[in-house]
Amino acid sequence: MGVPNIEAPCEAEAQCVALCKSDKVFAVALKDMDTLTFGAPRFLRHLMDSSSKKISVMEFEVPKVLEELRLTMDQFIDLCILSGYDYCDTIKGKLFYEILYIQQV
């Protein structure tokens, strides 16, 4: 079909982020938000939503999100891990919220 493709050497999400960081693509658009932890500068959510609902595409500019949350990238990654993601479960109970509150103080 002549459609160019790239075979990622490891995680496809990391490869997509590398393409975005090098300005070869405008943004990264995947179903889950784990891509944010790889440092994607721009992320599109619901771009290819297959549900019957008409959900608007959401664009996130990660540096702006971090600025609004007053978090560094390392702190954001820790927050994502505590929230749960593809490779580990979320922390049960109120502990997560207590940790988040302590970090903000």
Image (spheres, rainbow, N blue to C red):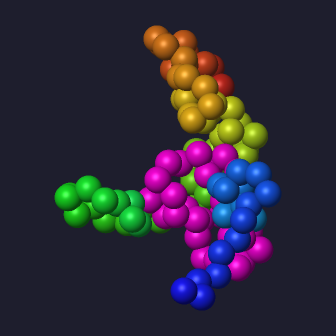
The residue positioned farthest toward the front in the image shown:
1
The residue positioned farthest toward the left in the image shown:
52
Q: Residue at x 68, y 32 (%)?
A: 78
Q: Residue at x 58, y 70 (%)?
A: 27
Instruction: Out of 76 and 34, give the one closest to the viewer.
Output: 34
Where is residue 44 shown, x and y percent of the image? 49, 64
Q: Is residue 25 magenta?
A: yes
* Residue 41 in view of the camera: yes
Q: Is residue 60 left or right of residue 6?
A: left
Instruction: Out of 9 and 29, give the one closest to the viewer.
Output: 9
Magenta highlight range:
19-45
Q: Residue at x 53, y 48 (%)?
A: 33
- Quarter residue 8 falls in: bottom right
Q: Check the image and report above or below for 98 versus 69.
A: above
Instruction: Out of 6 and 33, give the one closest to the viewer.
Output: 6
Q: Check the image and report above or below for 38 versus 46.
A: above
Q: Residue at x 60, y 88 (%)?
A: 2
Where is residue 74 shown, x and y percent of the image? 75, 40
Q: Is residue 45 left or right of residue 41?
A: left
Q: Is residue 21 magenta?
A: yes
Q: Is residue 60 left or right of residue 81?
A: left
Q: Quadrant of the C terminus?
A: top right
Q: How many marks?
A: 0
Q: Quadrant of the N terminus?
A: bottom right
Q: Check the image and report above or below for 77 versus 48.
A: above
* Residue 67 in view of the camera: no
Where is residue 53 shown, x and y percent of the image? 20, 58
Q: Is residue 27 left or right of residue 49?
A: right
